[in-house]
Amino acid sequence: MQGDQAFLPVRERGAFKWITWGIFFFLLDLVLLYYGNQYLSHVAERLKNRDFGTMLFGSVFGVLVHGSQVFLLIISWVLAGRGTGRHVKWGGLAVGLALSSVGIGLTGAALPTLSTRLVYSFPLGLAIAVLMAVLFQLLTLRVENWVDQATAMLLWVYSFQSLELLPSFPTNAQALSSLFQSIYGSNEEVIVASVAGTGLFLSFLAGALISTWLLTSYSIRLGQVRRIWEMESRQAARDEATAFQEVNTLDMRSLVHDLKNPLAVIKGMTLMIKNGADEPTLEKAEIMLKATHYMEQMIGEILHEDKRHAVRAGPFFDNLERHIHPFPWGEHVEMTLAEGVENLSLTLNEIRFTRVLYNILDNAWRANRTAGTQKIELRVQRNRRFLEIEILDNGPGYPPDKGPRPRKSGWGSTGLGLAFARKTVAAHGGRLTLSKRGDGKSGVRALVELPLADESADDP
């Protein structure tokens, strides 16, 4: 994806999903908060005259309800913060942490003003709950599965919520635990309650610590395995493509080499026909000899990478324009030659350099198909001692060129075509660069710079 905009589509980055889940859990929390507190108050009234054991059991039940309320509060704002953070381009983590912190604090402070039933019971206060939510998000930053994160968070909440059973941590909610802490009949009952609360706190805390450590370690290792697998897959694809290219090149060289024998026969027979032939036949023999000479030149350039010959820019691009028409993108290429370019001289391996332009034009066509456009512009002009060939597409574009390594364009290309083009242009003493279009349009600008032959370089 292109990162030129400050905000990306919500659906593309999953922000809508997280915000929706956050709203759902928040509404569920409001229902549990109101009716849960109401039910616990009702149960507390009915347990006033019961024995200590019944009250202890009821208080544990109250801890579980209060913990669920706090958990839903935290997880709803954490998910909303994550969704909002994914919606922005920069500082997503900071935005998510800030929103979840402010949301938890404001919700815990504002809801009690609406109803006495909307009071959160957290022994250490909501400020600690906010801090716990922030620290937990930072600790599990590399845990990708939010269900795993939520499970570990639940244990953290219950570990601190179990402190509600201790006499030294009075709660502000009118529920079972507050009633229970007000009716301790003896020191023995205080000790029993303290032991029960401490036992629950330590067991939940140990589970929370172990689960968080296991989840984080597992996610880090899973991420490492995934990255290694992706690197190996990309390398295997590159190796396969390279091997296929090498096999094709070898087969092509063998085939071209084998063409030399029948071509030699044709050339020899033409020379025999030429000797002693009448005027019409002699003219046809001359045409055949020129064709065989051109084929020999083509074979030499294919077999020998360093073989060059002098060409004029005008005939070369006329020939290129004729040969690109059979391609599916041929009719969409708009070629423009600046004044005076036709007479410039170049020293080229004509076959290989023509293939360079084919590869770039084909890549431009693929980019246009991705964006639903068609037009490809090919502009040729002189810049001092160089001939500049500029190819412009109207595709989605990609970041500026950063080096000679093969790179996939993102629309079905392996990157080997551009690698061949860059290597061939460099062998001709030139340079191939890729960049964004500079005329305000989307797309890629491929610029090939070729040195002119000496006779052209000296022209004014």
Image (cartoon, rainbow, N blue to C red):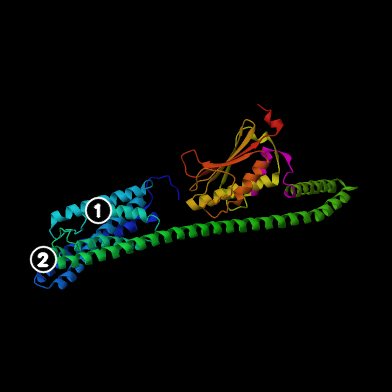
> Residue most toward the front?
187
Q: Vertical placement of 207 versus 379: above or below? A: below
At 32% from the left edge and 63% from the top edge, which residue is drawn?
Answer: 206
> Residue most toward the top?
460
Q: Vertical placement of 165 versus 10: above or below? A: below
Identify which amino acid the numbered label 1 is placed on: Ile
Residue nearer the viewer, 248 or 460 = 248
Residue range of the region highlighted in magenta in the rendering: 302-323
Secondary structure under badge 2?
loop
Residue holding disc 1 = 128
Task: Pinpoint residue 353: horizontal percent, then vertical percent.
Answer: 67, 45
At 30% from the left edge and 55% from the top edge, which residue is drawn?
Answer: 78
Secondary structure under badge 1?
helix
Task: Pinpoint residue 315: horizontal percent, then vertical percent.
Answer: 68, 40
- Marks 2 and 1 close (CB-CB < 8 Å): no
Q: Quadrant of residue 150?
A: bottom left
Rounded to the nearest angstrom, the CA distance separating label 2 from label 1 is: 28 Å
Viewport quadrant of the C terminus: top right
Q: Vertical placement of 356 versus 112: above or below? A: above
* Mark found first going from the N terminus, 2 or 1: 1
Task: Pinpoint residue 229: horizontal percent, then vertical percent.
Answer: 52, 60
Q: Quadrant of residue 379?
A: top right
Identify which amino acid the numbered label 2 is placed on: Ile
Residue holding disc 2 = 183
